[in-house]
Amino acid sequence: MVERIRSLLARFAEDEQTVRQLVATEASFDVLCEEYHRLIELLDGFDEHIKQLRQLQVLLEEELLTRIEGHQPQ
């Protein structure tokens, strides 16, 4: 359970006791917590992909600039 609500507790730390009680007593709240957890995991995955894509962008731009600057007009 703790892993599932970790990101929620990080976001709403001041309400930890209430969150824990709601998770334990209200099934619909627990379902929302699970959905929130999955969403955060997806967003974290996208962040990592975006970081990798930005690194690829830099490499490609460097290669393109090298070729542009080394091009000899005919």
Image (spheres, grey):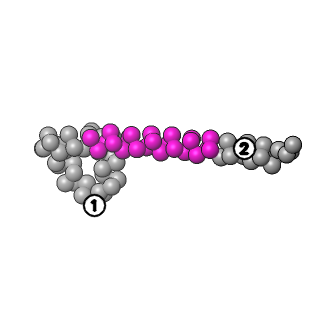
Tally of numbered tags: 2
Q: Nearer the viewer, mark 1 or mark 2?
A: 2
Q: Main secondary structure of the magenta part?
A: helix
User: Which type of secondary structure does the marked residue at label 1 adopt?
Assistant: helix
Pick whichever, 41 or 59, lies toward us: 59
Q: Residue at x 62, y 41 (%)?
A: 56
* Residue holding disc 2: 64
Residue carrying label 1? 14
- Taking the spot 26% from the left edge, 40% from the top edge, the residue there is 34
Residue closer to the observer: 52 or 16? 52
Q: Real-space Cα distance between discs 1 and 2? A: 50 Å
Q: Secondary structure at mark 2?
A: helix
Residue 42 image point, x, y percent: 39, 40
For the C terminus, the quadrant is top right
Which three-letter amino acid code belongs to the residue tagged 2? Leu
19 or 53, which lies in front?
A: 53
Q: Which residues are magenta?
A: 35-57
